[in-house]
Amino acid sequence: MEVKEILVNRFISKSEIEGIDFVINSYVGCPNACKYCYASFMKNLKSHDEKWGTFLDVKMTDYKLRKRSIEGKTYLMSSTTDCYNIYEEKYELTRNILKQLINFDFKLIIETKNALILRDINLLKQMKNLEVFISISTLSEKILNDIEKESSIENRLQTIKKLHENGIKVGVSIAPFFPFLTDYKKIIEETKDYAFEYHFEFLKLKGESKREILKYIGDNYNEYYLEYANIYLLNNDEYYKKMRLEIENYCENLKISYKIF
């Protein structure tokens, strides 16, 4: 893993995500090394030749958050990295940002895969309007180990439970939703006692991540390869139209709060 400290003016940028005003990314790159990651395009923007998941730029700055730019807004931490990646344990960038944010009245959404977030429970409890989403795309350790690194399924399930037990509003991001492989009903069954809401994000593939995942499906789940080719090479969206209706009916029948992206 190539880790480099870089000097930056700020770690906040305007968001193009619906419902989010600004995003906070305190790192460039991500050691989670998810094969499907849509953020892998960042290496092209940041002049990295290394394979996605093998480098991390640590944003060093003395930038201080200001009340007038924070209050009344919605912030997402993070959109192109995992703010609780394993190097956060050393650098504490996310923790130091949270120490500033507890003084402001705004909405913060944190998305992560990693149990390190439990380190900051004392700070999270002080946030006025906080939602934490833990990402789970599968309950299969085999699939998980094949397509991404770091936190195990059991760690994620325990993290959801502990956050809930500490009074922190926690949801589950079923992301990405892998066609024919993601059993969303089982994920909901495992977490429904703790999660306030579910976010469904269908798998989006392009460039390097498309090649990686299609090869993975062909090598390991060849029975689904033609279906994936139909979706991601021929751009046929019939599967996701059908799945969207199924998810809507399932969640509404069980009175589960959800959003589909």
Image: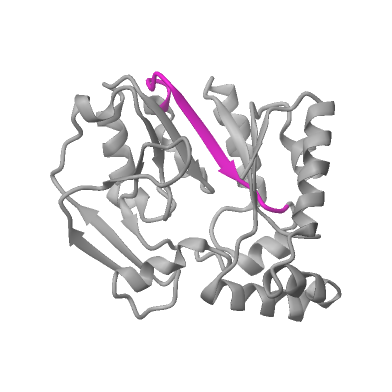
Out of 89 and 63, give the one closest to the viewer: 63
Which residue does the image show at 56% across and 70% down from the upper left? 206
Can you say whether 93 is above or below 98 in the image? below
Q: Is residue 21 left or right of residue 232?
A: left
Which residue does the image show at 69% across and 68% down from the upper left? 235
In the rendered image, residue 137 lying in the magenta stretch gets the answer yes
Q: Which residues are magenta?
A: 124-138
Q: Quadrant of residue 97?
A: top left
Q: Could one spot residue 32 in this view of the protein?
A: no
Can you say whether 135 is above or below 99 in the image? below
Q: Is residue 221 left or right of residue 122?
A: right
Q: Position of residue 207 (x, y in %)?
A: 53, 75
Q: Quadrant of residue 2?
A: bottom left
In the rendered image, residue 80 lying in the magenta stretch gets the answer no
Q: Position of residue 212 (x, y in %)?
A: 60, 76
Q: Position of residue 227 (x, y in %)?
A: 80, 70
Q: Is residue 105 left or right of residue 215?
A: left
Q: Quadrant of the N terminus?
A: bottom left
Q: Quadrant of the C terminus?
A: top right
Which residue does the image show at 81% across and 76% down from the upper left? 226
Can you say whether 228 is above or below 7 in the image? below
